[in-house]
Amino acid sequence: MNVITAIKLYIEKMTNESGPGLKIILMDKETTSIISMAFSQSDMLQREVYLFERIDSARSNERLKHLKCIVFIRPTKMNVSLLADELRSPKYGAYYIYFSNIIPRTDIKLLAESDESESVREVKEVYADFLCVNPNLFSFNIPYCMQSLKWIPEALMRSAQGLTSILLSLKIHPVIRYRAGSVVAETLAKQVYDVISKESSLFDFRSHDNGVPPPLLLILDRRDDPITPLLHQWTYQAMVHELLTINNNRVDLSKVSGISKDLKEVVLSGDQDEFYSGNLYSNFGEIGSRIKSMMDEYQKKAKDQRKVESISDMKNFVETYPQFKKMSGTVSKHVRVIGELSDQTAQRNLLNISELEQDIACRADHSAQLQRVKKLVADEKTAVKDALKLVAIYALRYERHANCDIMGLLQTIEKRGGKASFVPKLIEYAGQHARQGELFSTVRITDAVKFTRNLIKGLKEIENVFTQHTCLLKETLEEVFKGRDLDPMYQVVGSYVPFRRPHQEVVVFMIGGATYEEALAVHQLNVSGYRVILGGTTIHNSDSFINEVAHATIGVQPKHTKSLQQFYSPD
Amino acid sequence: MANPFDSDDSQILEGFLCPLCREDLKTPEKLTIHVEKVHAEEQDVVKSLKDIFSIAKKKIKLNFDETVDLAKAFDTTLKPNYSGGQIDVITDGEQTVGVDCDHFSYLNAIRTPRLERYASETNKLIIRIDKLLKERPTDPVQRKLHDQKTVPWLDGSSVKLCPNCAKSFNFTRRQHHCRLCGTIMCKDCSLFLKYEFALQLANLAQTTEDISKASEEGKQKDEGIRVCDHCLRLLETRKEMQDSRTCRPPITLYYDRIKEIEKEIAPDIPMYSKIIKSLYDGDTIFTLADASALRGKIGHAAEKIDSLSKAILSLPCPQGSREEALKKAVRLACIKMIKEEMLSIPSLPDEQEIKKIRDRRRMETEQRIERERRLALEAHERYGLGATNSTTMSNAENAAFGSAMTTLDNWSAYQSSTATSSDPLVEQINIIKGYIKQARQDLRFEEVATLEMNLRELQGEFYRRHQETKQA
């Protein structure tokens, strides 16, 4: 269960099936991202793919009949008709066509009728229809998936297709469960279920009769846990995404002052960058010391370079050159990125803010916390957007507290020019009325197990104040693996004979976007022997999450935030 | 001193000889087949022969497995380990490629009948062209009659509009006929098939001379043969298919050669590392000269690839075209390949150093043998005479093993007195030595390693037998 490997295997299959020779690959916008997440350009060169072309952009008419053309596109109407045009006047010698998902037969017929020069050699569906971010994390790059708190139809279709492809690429025929009470989760779960029943011949692998429980596809709703995407993160990958934004493994550094030309955009790919893959989940402190040791090593080598005197020295140096060059690239890249992270942390007073964020997320202590929030929000040194996030976290926690002072805080935000409308929107989107489960462990006496657990949690000394929050997903997954009764919270689609043993393999999908903090939780579970893959409509940081909330609440009449109507801007 | 391996009749036979009829069979497979076929009645011999090979194979395999493991261990210890367990360890065996669904047969089922229909239609047209061009009169009136005779024209009396552009026919817009299918169209909708092209299609023109001659003729007469849009398209598609199948510009020729060299050199690079490693380990299978020769070969291949990719880059092509981009990409891939795989191979070890390692290793082996012998002797004394036979046996075995492990040179001393050249084992050893020499010359080091192992097996076996006979 490694999503990067799954994509790689598919791409290798595609490049192998066309045999040796000069090749070009024809892609669309999305499949370009899919491939670029798994392979670098030089990897593709090694597979004899020398040219890259987009089917959906202006193309030259130059004919290169001695090239084989690998076509890898999503099965959209638009793509099929573009491909049919291409086949009517083929520019390349032979075509090997791969669709990234299930394609209707009528479309194949159209292609067959367009191929008058008999240049198609292969037509296949391969299910590489998702972006692999980490080995355990995938995304569909849907920036926002809801409007008026309902699915946007295209986003629903894309998610269902993407999930189908995940299942097929990993050869999983799952039991599907969704978050009870969430309409969006239910709709998606049913769509995926329908596809599986309709395409039963595709899903015809592995029978689970020898006591192994079937894998589980668990469809969740971001609205159950709106806190995680708002918290500031301190692990490397999450932090880079929060402060600099990772987009398809690429980080844009062009706004950083004094950046050298070749570092304007850096690629952070765990697959090609050993340092990065080794430190995805390291926290900021650890990473600082590691980069230092790496620098030392680098400098030692760089000094060696200067000390080259004899011929044998030179030889030695040249022989280690490829590694050296690679390393120097990695070092300067990460030094730059980390430097930027630490600058922002200091400038924006993020340590203080994060400490309070974590405190509110994990511990109920209204009056003291309110005082601290007030102080930080009013402080000119706190960036407005950080202040807004802080208020949002406070609002989520104390929405129904008797002395809740969202009003006062929002007035301060508005005075400072912040987008105060976000907070009422967030509460409409994921306030207590919308949430299920216990986001903030509000202790109920009836649940003795939870009560004692919370008590123990409270007594334990907190190891790190900045990372004390654990996301809801982790608790959910722990329950799955402990074999708790899932029925009341997570309903099954279709008929299902209950299994005595807990599931061993789980694919979790978060409607409304997953986060890198959750990826970390999944990673920790995987390290301790479970098998989990996480996916989301997208991977959020706080900015993109704010955007998602804004879209989801377009056209929603405020029901739960009438008192905050004055902040509800009509946008 | 006479070479102990020389046979009585002073004629040296080499190769995979059949032990029964002394025929040289060149390869072990052929030998096995030969014995199975020709000497079918002597089944036990066949069996023993097979056994020898299979045992040898097994042993070889075992040895190679070990080296692979070592290499792995080597790799893992050398690789920088940044932090434990950052990458997910979800390994349930090898992950296999996901599901796929093939639609090609469906596509073909739809495409084939269509293509066949087009093909037969096109063929018909070509036959007509052929007929039209044969003895075509130069006089326009005669020609028209000739055309009309070859392809019956449609009766135009009831056709009031041009079927293509729907304009009405009148005095100024007169009816014309497609010379290939006989349909009607107006002047504006008529297209012309060039003579040159027509001749090519009909395969009448055998040489370019013919074509140029014909096109000259054509120019004198008129634009070509009047055809309709449909017929012309069919013919052009056919032409294009023919062209694209035979399209082999120079870049592909160079490229194929690069790939050939890469393929040829591919096994040599890991082999080279293996040789270097074995040299550092003090093994005697390979020599420093082997490594140097192989290194030279790899370097030579790198040079060849470099010059070929440069040749690709210098092929003429319009600036800013994708052809240019393609050439650049190929060159880039070649440079990368040369830099990362062919030039990054470790340098040759120092001769002195290797010698030192070897000496040390030999010392260690000798010490070990000595120690074992001492232990055996002690055991012998402890258990008394009852165990005499078995201990001497194991002693002998140890010694044999030791000798095989140390060097090959001190080998010849052993059998000079006793070895009889009629011994098939000795012959086999001789043959294998010859092969090793040959393989070395041809830089086939994989074979060298296999044969060396084989040789040691045989030598060990020979020594054991020799000891046995001595005792007897």
Image: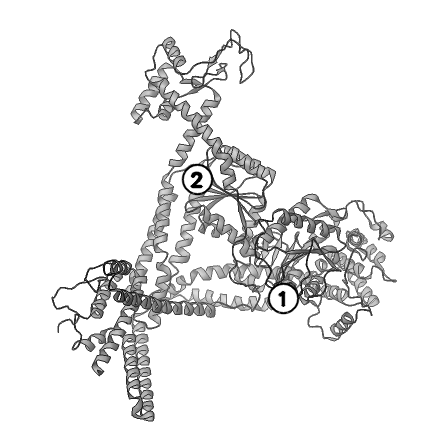
Which residue is at the front of the view, A309 or B352? B352
Which residue is at the front of the view, A104 or B22? B22
Q: Secondary structure at mark 1?
A: helix
Question: Residue B151 appears at what percent x and percent y?
Answer: 41, 16
Q: Cα distance, mark 2 to mark 1? A: 49 Å
Q: From this viewpoint, is residue A65 visible?
A: yes
Q: Amino acid at mark 2?
A: Glu
Residue at the spot x=66%, y=45% of the render? A157
Q: Secondary structure at mark 2?
A: helix
- Residue on which the image places disc 2: B323
Q: Residue furthest front?
A: B41
Q: Amino acid at mark 1?
A: Gln
Q: Relative to A371, is B155 on the left or the right?
A: left
Question: Residue B99 appears at what percent x and percent y?
Answer: 54, 51
| Subunit bearing disc 2 | B
Which residue is at the front of the view, B451 or B356? B451
Q: Quadrant of residue A344?
A: bottom right
Q: From this viewpoint, is residue B314 visible?
A: no
Q: Relative to B424, is B29 on the left or the right?
A: right
Quadrant where the image shows the C terminus of chain A: top right
Q: Residue furthest left?
A: B9
Q: Quadrant of residue A236?
A: bottom right
Residue at the spot x=65%, y=52% of the render? A538
- Residue on which the image places disc 1: A524
